[in-house]
Amino acid sequence: MTDAELVTQARQGDPAAFSELVDRHQSAVYRAALAALGSHADAEDAAQDAFLLAYRRLDSFRGDASFKTWLLTITWRQAINRRRGLARVWRRLSGRQPDDERDELLETIADVAPTPEAAAAQTELRRAVAEAIRGLSPRLRDTLLLAQSGECSYEEMGAMLHAPVGTVKWRISEARRRVRQALEDQGFLLKHRELC
């Protein structure tokens, strides 16, 4: 059964149809939220909020884009709104930078450590990568993190970010170039594949 058929059934009150849509897109929704938030708990909350909002707004789905793209757009907006709210709370309560809570996601980009020496080098590299990513503008950083989530096509990212596909591709390329340059400036010698 296609997503469009399931949407039609869900609109007619079939809860099993919407449940099937949730099952199909749960991973993509979670990973998009995680890319925006960096926290597993916050990503789970944002994903649940996105599914609830999508269910409530199911009648507004026009079918101009795929259901997945529509759902991921809702997810991205929910996650960004949650991130803004969390940033305000973090600033008030702790004085920490709002991006600090995303370190777990940022530091997993280059995660391999076979020996103690390699582990120490990897830890240093992960910190440098996380710092370089935090130093990007929000548009470049968010686009890069969304691309690294691996769940979205360029077209879906464009719809979520309200940007043409060419702009999305440029942002990803430019973000990777700047991260690579920042690492090279710190003395890290990287092969292109490590940041792709």
Image: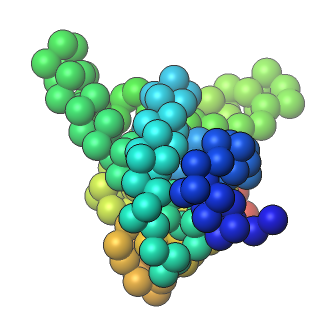
Q: Residue furthest right?
A: 114
Task: Find residue 108 and report its horizontal and vertical position in percent.
Answer: 63, 38
Judging depth in this view, the residue of 95 and 187 nearest the camera is 95
Residue at coordinates 58% horizontally, 56% vertically from top-left?
12
Q: Residue furthest top?
A: 93
Task: Find residue 95 and report its horizontal and vertical position in percent.
Answer: 18, 19
The colour style of the image is rainbow
Residue 186 in view in this figure: no
Q: Residue furthest front?
A: 12
Q: Is 97 on the left-hand or right-hand side of 74?
A: left
Task: Find residue 171 and report its horizontal and vertical position in percent.
Answer: 42, 72
Location of residue 37 with respect to 13 vertically, above or below: above
Location of residue 163 with respect to 175 vertically, above or below: below
The N terminus is located in which quarter? bottom right
Q: Is 137 on the left-hand or right-hand side of 116?
A: left
Residue 88 in view in this figure: yes
Res 68 → quadrant: bottom right
Judging depth in this view, the residue of 138 and 3 nearest the camera is 3
Residue at coordinates 35% horizontally, 52% vertically from top-left?
77
Judging depth in this view, the residue of 7 and 41 nearest the camera is 7
Residue at coordinates 79% horizontally, 32% vertically from top-left?
113
Residue at coordinates 62% horizontally, 30% vertically from top-left?
123
The C terminus is located in which quarter? bottom right
Res 141 → quadrant: bottom left
Location of residue 73 with respect to 172 vertically, above or below: above
Res 125 → quadrant: top right
